[in-house]
Image (cartoon, rainbow, N blue to C red):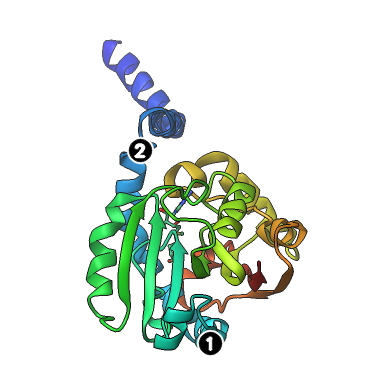
């Protein structure tokens, strides 16, 4: 009798184990939201971000074309211009995948909110000795008080506007630090406009776990926010899709809709 009851209880839990898993998942997400924001999530994200190496490999040539016109830019500072130096500020560089696109003699400052990326970033930087590292600021793109007004020739962001707390405030800061005529080069994944099922998944993921775990909202319309921003004198941008190859297809398709552009202050 007792044994039968035991088997019944065991079967009940076996058939309902998915409920326990779901509850455990929600409990973990709750804990992450409450206590993980400043330590667990950034540490986790910096540790796993290299999984995106396949994305960067696929996009390398497209990114090279996007950044190519940077070599024709000149510094607004007459002394630096004579020396062929360009002042670049990159927001959210992560492990530093963009060094290879910067012109020789660039002078680089970065504003990165996640301190756990520093080790990978400086390891990467050591391979590009022709780029002078000015400063690594640990802080928000929305509040770059350590960067003076009108002090950089170029601002760069790649896959960052999906993560910032406020795109509008980040753009305000970008406009403040850029010299008049300075350029903002951006390359961002954005909300899906073509495939409804992909958009559905983007919404579902963004409102449940994706932001908490990866600090990223898949359903942002960064392209529209930049285009409608009155602080730039000109915005040239194009929507495009990144190549979808290999086993990462399922992950890449929710990031596939992109915008690249150059906005002028
Ligand atoms: C998806 S990763 C992109 C990293 C790199 N730019 C790339 O193209 O691989 C987003 C990066 O933006 C950083 N980030 C997120 N919010 C930020 C903010 N408000 N200000 C500055 N950096 C931020 C993250 O820490 C992370 O390094």
Is residue 23 toward the left or the right of residue 265 in the image?
left
Vertical relation: 200 (above or below) 76 = above
Measuring 40% from the left and 48% from the top, which residue is drawn there? Answer: 139
- The image shows residue 160 at horizontal and vertical percentages of 51, 58
Residue assigned mark 2? 38
Mark 2 Cα-neighbour bin, 10 Å: few <14, some 14–19, many ≥20: some
- The image shows residue 59 at horizontal and vertical percentages of 50, 79
Q: Is residue 230 visible?
A: yes
- The image shows residue 173 at horizontal and vertical percentages of 56, 53
Residue 85, by quadrant, is bottom left
Q: Quadrant of the N terminus?
A: top left
Alpha carbons under labels 2 and 1: distance apart: 36 Å
Residue 118, by quadrant, is bottom left
Direction front: furthest residue:
79
- The image shows residue 71 at horizontal and vertical percentages of 50, 88
**Which of the two residues, 26 or 60, is positioned nearer the viewer here?**
60
Q: Which of the four quarters of the rendered structure image does ligand 1 lie in? A: bottom left
Vertical relation: 236 (above or below) 203 = below
Q: Of the two numbered discs 2 and 1 on the same chain, state the one appearing first in sequence.
A: 2
Direction top: furthest residue:
1
Measuring 38% from the left and 82% from the top, which residue is drawn there? Answer: 100
Residue 96, by quadrant, is bottom left
In what element is the residue under mark 1? helix
Is residue 161 toward the left or the right of residue 35 in the image?
right
**Which of the two residues, 41 or 23, is positioned nearer the viewer here?**
41
**Which of the two residues, 186 or 24, is positioned nearer the viewer here?**
186
Residue assigned mark 1? 68
In what element is the residue under mark 2? loop
């Amino acid at each position: 009798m007792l044994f039968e009851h035991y088997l019944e209880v065991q079967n009940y839990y076996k058939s309902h184990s998915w409920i326990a898993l779901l509850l455990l998942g929600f409990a973990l997400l709750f804990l992450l939201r409450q206590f993980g924001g400043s330590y667990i999530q950034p540490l986790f994200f910096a540790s796993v971000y290299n999984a995106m190496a396949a994305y960067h490999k696929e996009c390398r040539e497209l990114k090279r074309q996007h950044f190519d016109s940077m070599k024709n830019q000149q510094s607004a500072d007459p002394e630096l211009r004579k020396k062929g130096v360009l002042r670049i500020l990159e927001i959210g560089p992560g492990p530093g995948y963009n060094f290879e696109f910067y012109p020789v003699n660039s002078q680089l400052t970065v504003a990165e909110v996640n301190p756990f990326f520093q080790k990978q970033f400086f390891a990467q930087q050591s391979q590009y000795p022709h780029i002078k590292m000015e400063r690594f600021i640990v802080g928000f793109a929305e509040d770059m008080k350590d960067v003076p007004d009108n002090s950089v020739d170029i601002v760069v962001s790649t896959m960052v506007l999906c993560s910032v707390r406020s795109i509008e405030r980040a753009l305000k800061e970008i406009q403040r630090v850029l010299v008049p005529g300075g350029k903002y080069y951006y390359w961002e994944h954005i909300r899906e406009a073509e495939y409804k099922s992909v958009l559905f998944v983007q919404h579902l993921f963004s409102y449940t776990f994706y932001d908490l775990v990866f600090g990223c909202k898949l359903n942002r319309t960064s392209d529209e926010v930049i285009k409608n921003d009155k602080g730039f004198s000109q915005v040239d941008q194009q929507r495009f899709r990144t190549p979808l190859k290999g086993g990462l297809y399922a992950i890449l398709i929710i990031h596939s809709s992109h915008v690249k552009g150059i906005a002028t202050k």
